[in-house]
């Protein structure tokens, strides 16, 4: 095991910090982690109301690698299924894994979203968390997330979601770890059919409020250029999206002041 992996594991065991970083998919990540109002196939792990923007059955896979360490990585799978159009109901599944050999965390989610009108969508997600640490055993926990998106007009969307409002935690007496409770509020502005600007505030309990800003620019229908920043801690993001018919390839790079650059790639297909 590398020294970096060992240090992460030590911090987890001491209860000093949580390093679990379930990625939000390359599009949302490259836009500065603006998942509150940006609707995407990976809304299954951000604002659950965002799944109501997906028009056909869509699935995606995702892989992210921490360059500072040879073992540490994240993987994800997402699926969104629109049900009967008259009911305006959508379902979603997600599977995320973060960690390395001696430590890993898995999060499985089931999401249900509904459009109550052309303006308002609400989503609910139930999560099963699994934590496993070598020589310390494993633990499970359940949590629920709730979100909403309001379309003000053809240009502006306002979104908000909260994760784990009931403050659930892992049932482990050996390793005291909590599941993050966060409040996320944001807005997206379509300044044209080529430019999407997003901004949000994210507040984790007992932590500073994170301010996030991102942009998606599509000079042509086959290409998107994305960028963003967040302030707590100060991180920079960049990404590219390539589209061909029903297939999309998205990439992202996250630059963290302590762990350096983390590249991410995702592949999605709309049936």
Image (spheres, rainbow, N blue to C red):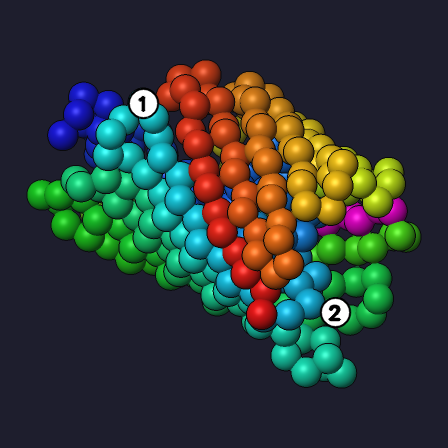
Residue at image x 67%, y 75%?
A: 89
Q: Is the magenta stretch mostly helix, strand or loop?
A: strand
**Could you say where residue 74 lies in the image, as x and y percent from the top left?**
36, 43
As drawn, is 209 to the left or to the right of 63?
right
* Residue 196 in view in this figure: no
Residue at the (84%, 45%) spot, across then down = 193
- Residue at which label 1 appears: 68
**In which quarter of the view is residue 16 placed?**
top left
In the image, taking residue 128 as reference, residue 59 lies left or right, namely right
Cα–Cα span, label 1 and label 2 = 42 Å
Name the element at disc 2. strand
- Which sits in the foreground, 105 or 183? 105
Q: Can residue 263 be seen in this view?
A: yes
Residue drawn at the location 35% of the way across and 30% of the way down: 66
Q: Give the range drawn in magenta.
A: 155-161
Residue 205 among those drawn in magenta: no
Image height check: is 83 above or below 121?
below
Q: Furthest residue to the top? A: 257
The quadrant of the picture occupied by the C terminus is: bottom right
Residue 24 in the image, given as x and y percentages of width and height: 52, 45
User: On the image, numbered disc 2 is attached to which residue?
Assistant: 115
């Amino acid at each position: 095991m590398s020294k970096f992996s060992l240090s992460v594991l030590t911090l987890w065991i001491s209860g000093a910090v949580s390093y679990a970083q379930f990625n939000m998919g390359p599009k949302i990540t490259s836009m500065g982690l603006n998942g509150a109002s940006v609707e995407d196939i990976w809304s299954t792990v951000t604002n659950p109301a965002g799944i109501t923007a997906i028009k056909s059955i869509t699935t995606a896979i995702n892989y992210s690698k921490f360059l500072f360490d040879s073992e540490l990585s994240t993987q994800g799978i997402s699926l969104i299924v629109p049900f009967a159009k008259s009911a305006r109901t959508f379902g979603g599944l997600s599977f995320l894994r973060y960690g390395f050999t001696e430590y890993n965390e898995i999060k499985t989610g089931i999401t249900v979203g509904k459009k109550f009108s052309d303006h308002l969508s609400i989503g609910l997600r139930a999560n099963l968390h699994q934590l496993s640490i070598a020589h310390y055993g494993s633990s499970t926990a359940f949590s629920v997330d709730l979100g909403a998106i309001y379309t003000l007009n053809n240009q502006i969307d306002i979104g908000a979601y909260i994760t784990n409002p009931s403050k659930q935690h892992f049932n482990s007496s050996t390793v005291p770890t909590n599941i993050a409770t966060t409040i996320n509020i944001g807005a997206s502005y379509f300044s044209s059919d080529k430019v999407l600007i997003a901004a949000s505030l994210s507040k984790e309990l007992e932590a500073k409020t994170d301010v996030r800003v991102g942009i998606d620019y599509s000079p042509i229908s086959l290409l998107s250029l994305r960028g963003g920043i967040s302030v707590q801690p100060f991180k920079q993001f960049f990404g590219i999206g390539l589209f061909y018919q029903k297939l999309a390839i998205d990439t992202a790079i996250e630059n963290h002041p302590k762990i350096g650059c983390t590249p991410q790639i995702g592949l999605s297909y709309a049936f």
